[in-house]
Image: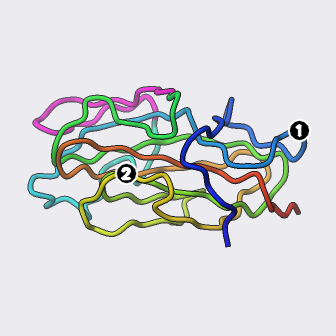
Amino acid sequence: HPPSLPTTDLAAIPGRKVSTSGQRPGWMFVDSWYVIGPFPNPARQNIDKQFPPETVIDLDAAYEGKNGRIVRWRFIQTGTPQLVPPDMEDYAIYYAWTELYFEEAMDVWIAVGSDDKSNLWINGQLVWMSSDQLKGWQINEGFRKVRFLKGVNRLLYRLENGHYVAGLSLAVSTEGTSTY
C-alpha cells in the first residue's frame, strides 16, 4: 500500500533530482514541465488519437494544434502540485514532458491526478491511464508503484480537457523505496 499522501504542504522536487540521501521522508510533487497544446478534441472525438508528442519528443518542434494554430513546447514551473496548461481550452489535448534524475534505481510510489482524462508514460512504458469520465482534479486520484532507472528517466503526460478547467499532477514518494 502507498504511504499516506497529504493534500497540502507537499514539497516540490527542485531540479527534478531524487537522491537516496538527505531527503526528508514524505511526498514531493514534480514542479517543472515542458507543455504543448492545445490539440483538437471536438466533442471528445480525438480522445484516443495520437498526436506527434506521443511518437517523438522534440522540444524545438512546432505542430498544428487546435483551430490551425501553431503550438510549441513551453517550459512551465509551478508553485503548487497542480499544473494548469497555458492556453487552456475546452475539448483539447495537452502534453507535458519532464525528466527526473535518480541517483540509484528504485521502486517508488507515485500519485497521479488529472482533470479530465490522462495517461502517463515513464521511460516509454504506460504506467497510468485514468477513466474516460469527465472529472475534477484530485492529487490522489491514483497510485502506482513504478521502477525508476538510475540516471535520467523521461516522463510524458497526456491530458484531455473536456470543458472548463484542466490540470495534472505527479507526486513522488520518498518513503519506503528499495534501491538496487
Residue that mark 1 sits on = 22
Q: What residue range appears in magenta?
A: 59-77
Based on the picture, tell me whether residue 66 belongs to the magenta stretch: yes
Task: Give percent across and percent down for residue 142.
Answer: 50, 64
- Please state, as top left, top right, bottom left or bottom right, where the N terminus lies in the image: bottom right
Task: Look at label 1 and name its amino acid.
Answer: Gly
Question: Which secondary structure lies at badge 2?
Answer: loop
Mark 2 or 1, nearer chain start: 1
Residue that mark 2 sits on = 137
Question: Which secondary structure lies at badge 1?
Answer: loop
Task: Give percent across and percent down for residue 164.
Answer: 19, 43
| Point 16% across, 39% down: residue | 66
**Number of callouts:** 2
Decide: is 163 above or below 107.
above
Based on the picture, tell me whether residue 93 belongs to the magenta stretch: no
Spatial CA distance of label 2 from label 1 is: 31 Å
Task: Look at label 2 and name its amino acid.
Answer: Trp
Q: Nearer the viewer, residue 180 or 12?
A: 12
- Classed neighbour count for the residue bearing mark 2: other residues with Cα under 10 Å, few (<14), some (14–19), many (≥20): some
Task: Give percent across and percent down for residue 80.
Answer: 51, 33
Q: Judge from the rendering whether residue 76 lies leftward or rightward of residue 63; answer left or right.
A: right
